[in-house]
């Protein structure tokens, strides 16, 4: 399943540039220029990553990512901003628990690398969860037993008749 990424920025030019840049990366891209709509989109589309601008009307990026953190704690949060403000960076990290902080103009290669890394981590976590959910009794892995002639012997459970 493709990584679902939501970009939130009040500048439509930025949203269009992101769509062009990431169009062939295999991600499912969603965009909105309204921070309050972002919360609805996260629930509707089961978003994996939210990338938010810092300076927006209605809510700042920090406020939005803090809200996302409370409502959807498993969603990865990234701040992308043209405001190189140390205090904003600290607030984003502390309140929004952002995993990455990118400055505008962003480097496409860096953004793509970050999203691919997040996707890889998400897939590894899903695989680990699936493995943990397999009951030990359903495991078909057994030691190979051979008889005197070298033929493989398959032990059969006398009660169930299964291997």
Image (spheres, grey):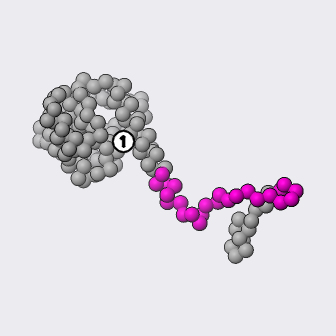
Q: Position of residue 10 (x, y in %)?
A: 18, 33
Circle 1 is placed at which residue position?
A: 4
Residue lying farthest front? Answer: 148
Q: Nearer the viewer, residue 12 or 163?
A: 163
Picture quadrant of residue 143:
bottom right
Q: Against 59, is 103 above or below?
A: above
Q: Secondary structure at mark 1?
A: strand
The answer to whether 115 appears left or right of 39 in the picture is right
Quadrant of the frame with the C terminus: bottom right
Q: Position of residue 42 (x, y in %)?
A: 28, 47
Q: Against 148, is 35 above or below?
A: above
Q: Residue at x 84, y 55 (%)?
A: 150
Residue 142 belongs to the span the image colors magenta: yes
Say if residue 120 shows up in the picture: yes
Residue lying farthest right? Answer: 149
The answer to whether 147 appears left or right of 17 in the picture is right
Q: Position of residue 22 (x, y in %)?
A: 36, 30
Quadrant of the frame with the N terminus: top left
Q: Residue at x 20, y 30 (%)?
A: 81
Q: Against 73, is 103 above or below?
A: above
Say if residue 35 shows up in the picture: no
Q: Residue at x 20, y 44 (%)?
A: 94
Q: Residue at x 24, y 36 (%)?
A: 79
Q: Position of residue 62 (x, y in %)?
A: 18, 41
Q: Nearer the viewer, residue 125 or 10?
A: 125
Picture quadrant of residue 49:
top left
Q: Against 103, is 76 above or below?
A: below
Span of residues in magenta:
128-151
């Amino acid at each position: 399943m493709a990584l679902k990424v939501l970009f939130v920025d009040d500048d439509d030019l930025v949203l269009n540039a992101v769509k062009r840049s990431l169009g062939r990366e295999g991600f499912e891209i969603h965009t909105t220029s309204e921070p309050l709509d972002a919360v609805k989109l996260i629930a509707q589309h089961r978003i994996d990553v939210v990338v938010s601008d810092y300076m927006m009307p209605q809510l700042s990026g920090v406020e939005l990512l803090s809200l996302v953190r409370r409502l959807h704690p498993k969603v990865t949060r990234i701040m992308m901003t043209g405001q190189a403000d140390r205090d904003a960076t600290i607030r984003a990290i502390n309140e929004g628990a952002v995993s990455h902080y990118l400055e505008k103009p962003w480097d496409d290669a860096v953004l793509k690398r970050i999203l691919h890394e997040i996707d890889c981590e998400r897939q590894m976590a899903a695989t680990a969860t699936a493995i943990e959910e397999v009951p030990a009794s359903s495991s078909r892995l057994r030691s190979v037993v051979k008889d005197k002639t070298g033929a493989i012997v398959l032990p059969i459970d006398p009660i169930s008749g299964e291997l």
